[in-house]
Image (cartoon, grey):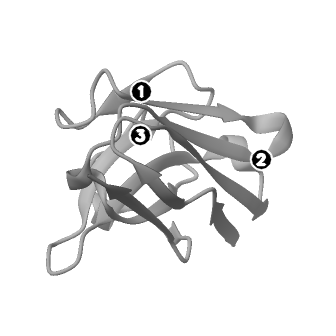
């Protein structure tokens, strides 16, 4: 079992930055691929970014590529999502998810992930 807790959300003006954290507890975190997803009001949950177990591989949705950076510190059991140049369309609840144990590198499909956090709200004002 893996427990995930997101933090770092809030209200920011367009063009600003936020860093989300996803703290994990439970089983060995380095065995798990981690993804960030988001869900805006009235919309389906969508993929944002994913990172491999050792942090060596990552993948991003086209909408955030070049603006968001996913990273992890397995010693701290934490994955981060640095979000720069935020825009109003980035407003959503952001969720982290962990999948595994696994040998795959990264995963975009939300239904593959075993464990989910409760989400953190990000609101970008224009």
Residue 97 appears in the rendering: no
Q: In this view, does 69 lie to the left or right of 65?
A: right
How far apart, in angstroms, are the residues tagged by discs 3 and 2?
Answer: 15 Å
Estimate the x, y position of residue 29 in percent, counting from the top left.
72, 49
- At horizontal 50% and vertical 71% (from top left) the residue drawn is 119
Residue 50, labelled with which disc?
Answer: 3
Q: Is mark 3 on a helix, strand or loop?
A: strand
The mark nearer the N terminus, 1 or 3, is: 3
Q: Are marks 1 and 3 in contact (CB under 8 Å)?
A: yes
Residue 93, labelled with which disc?
Answer: none
Q: In this view, does 73 lie to the left or right of 76?
A: left
- Give the class, few, some or many, for how many residues have Cα within 10 Å of label 3's Cα (few <14, many ≥20): many
Q: What element carries label 1?
A: strand
Estimate the x, y position of residue 69 in percent, counting from the top left.
46, 28
Q: Name the residue under label 1.
A: 58
- At horizontal 70% and vertical 40% (from top left) the residue drawn is 30
Q: Mark 2 points at which residue?
A: 77
Q: Do the residues labelled 2 and 1 touch (CB within 8 Å)?
A: no
Query: In front: 62, or 85?
Result: 85
The mark nearer the N terminus, 2 or 1, is: 1
On screen, 89 above or below 61?
A: below
How far apart, in angstroms, are the residues tagged by discs 2 and 1?
Answer: 17 Å
- At horizontal 69% and vertical 72% (from top left) the residue drawn is 1
């Amino acid at each position: 079992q893996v427990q995930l807790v997101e933090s770092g959300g809030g209200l920011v003006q367009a063009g600003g930055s936020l860093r989300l954290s996803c703290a994990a507890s439970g089983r060995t975190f380095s065995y798990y691929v981690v993804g960030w997803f988001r869900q805006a009001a009235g919309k389906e949950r969508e993929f944002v970014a994913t990172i491999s177990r050792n942090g060596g591989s990552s993948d991003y949705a086209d909408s955030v590529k070049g603006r968001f950076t996913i990273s992890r510190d397995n010693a701290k059991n934490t994955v981060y999502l640095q979000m720069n140049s935020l825009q109003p369309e980035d407003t959503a609840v952001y969720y982290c998810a962990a999948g595994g144990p696994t040998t795959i590198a990264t995963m975009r499909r939300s239904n593959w992930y075993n464990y989910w956090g409760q989400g953190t709200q990000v609101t970008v004002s224009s």
